[in-house]
Image (spheres, rainbow, N blue to C red):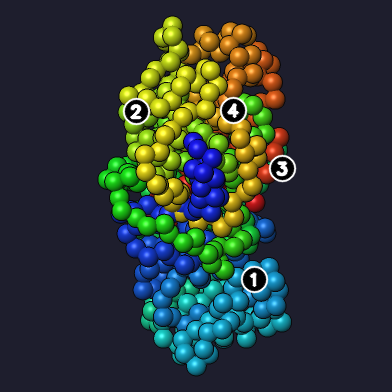
Amino acid sequence: MSDSNSESFNNDTHHQTYKAVDGIRKSTKRKNIGHLPSEILKFVKNESYSLLIKGKPGTGKTTFALTLLDNLNDDSNYFYISTRLSLKQLAFYFPWIEKFFSKDENKSGYRFEDARLDEPESLFERITNQLMDVKSPVIIIDTWDTIASFMDRESRLNNERVLQIWRERAGAKLIFLSETFDLGILDSIVDGVITLENNFHQANNWRLLRINKLRGLPIRCNTYTYSLFNGVFHSSDIISQLNLFDSYSGVKPYYKRSIHLAKKKSVGVDQKGFSYFELENLFTQNRTTNITIEATLSYEVLLSVLLKPLLNWLQQSDENKLMINNFDGLIRESYRRILNHHLAEDLFKYKVIEQEIDFTDPHGIKLSKQNDGFTHIVDKTVPIIEPTQTREIHFDSADYSNSKPSLNNANQVQILNILNTDNIDSLLSEDSFLELLNESFALNILIQRGSFLPSQIRYLRNVTCCEFKTIGKNLLLEINNHEINRYQMILDKDRSFVNLHPIL
């Protein structure tokens, strides 16, 4: 590149954003906070229901209830009864709920009641008054234990039945939170039962949401991992939803579309706290990153998860480049189409090295017909591109408000090599090959089904080890020797990217 073009490229790429996938967005971006399983979101659209949320202290029942409250989006009157926290404490631990307080009290709105000092009879009377006097209310009782513990068993069972009858007549939505698992018949008479669990494995949270019952609805997935990151409830998406290859199949590549440079979008108040984990930081910690995956996980899902961090890594420096090696031709072509959606044609040619190392060929290099402007990568030479016209180079937007400064020297080419090791087991057993990888011109991401042998790891010095594993129908990422080492996968609302959320 000429000095003038290089300077233009540098100025452009450091002020660029990613834009949502054209043609994929089917509705306006949902402003609700958090992320809940689709089964639950469908269930709460019913005109009337009762829902029981069970879990031990610290499992996130209050966080779930408040996040659900934000996602209801109807015209009902909301009545949140707290027997454990004051309104001030709720606002302190969940500052995002302050938007509820600005509702006009003369219209249907939100009410938070501090019932910590209420007698059970008085508290029960409040609930029944709401059911009788207010049209279609949403009542959340946090927690039902406080009321039930002061009643004898017979009185409690009768009152629970009465609440269900009044709830049906009022067309209300009644949500119980409970830390007691011996609730008599409440589990059987409510319409839905959800259990939250938090176990610890190697000093890390292992949070699971279990859907025990949603009356009248099929349950596609009864177990979800979840996080309480930033005081908001986020459940994982199931693996089948994470495959972006189909989402991009009908989308035109960037160079075939007529799109003007979009202004960078500001991040809304409800998004500022969402510090999504940036996987690209792992790429530069060591010369080699080892990613192991389970046998059932497809490469389409894996590359879909890596799409966002790869694009952000390319954005960190104008000299950061990418190559993908030893994958099936169909996968490579599909991923090329996805990358082509986000990168303008000349930027794609400059950033993505389509020459492929062929480990089955004595010459070792596969030449792409579209790479006439590239020299041999084994010579460590910068690919030469002669622009024929003034170009507009920019990335699409991925809702990242801040670009990290470049980790590389401005004039130093840094190649990220994603290498599928499925069919090169014999090479991975060769010490000389492992040493060559460790000392190569590129940063290497080695992807292998199963685990690397101890002998192989020994030669791959300073390796960052990651593992993608499935829990039911969810996909998790675990990173060894990392402060927060467990992450869940959540799909963007417009199905353009997969985000990684720390499980906290």
Out of 478 and 41, give the one closest to the viewer.
478
Q: Which residue is labeled 3 in the image?
A: 483
Camera-nearest residue between 292 and 375: 375
Report the residue at 51% width, 44% height from top: 4
Residue 69, image x and y in percent?
51, 71
Q: Viewer-proximal residue, 456 or 168?
A: 456
Residue under pointer 2: 370
Rendered image quadrant of residue 232: bottom right
**Few, some or many C-alpha atoms within 10 Å of disc 2 (few <14, some 14-19, many ≥20)?**
few
Q: CA distance from mark 4 to mark 1?
A: 41 Å
Secondary-structure class at tag 3: loop
Relative to 327, 229 lies left or right: right
Residue in the picture at 67% in, 15% down: 459
The residue carrying mark 4 is 443
Residue 95, which numbered label?
1
Q: Label 4 vs label 2: CA separation?
A: 24 Å
Q: Is residue 14 above or below residue 362?
A: below
User: In the image, residue 306 lies at what x, y percent?
Assistant: 49, 39
- Select label 4 or label 1 by which is in front: 4
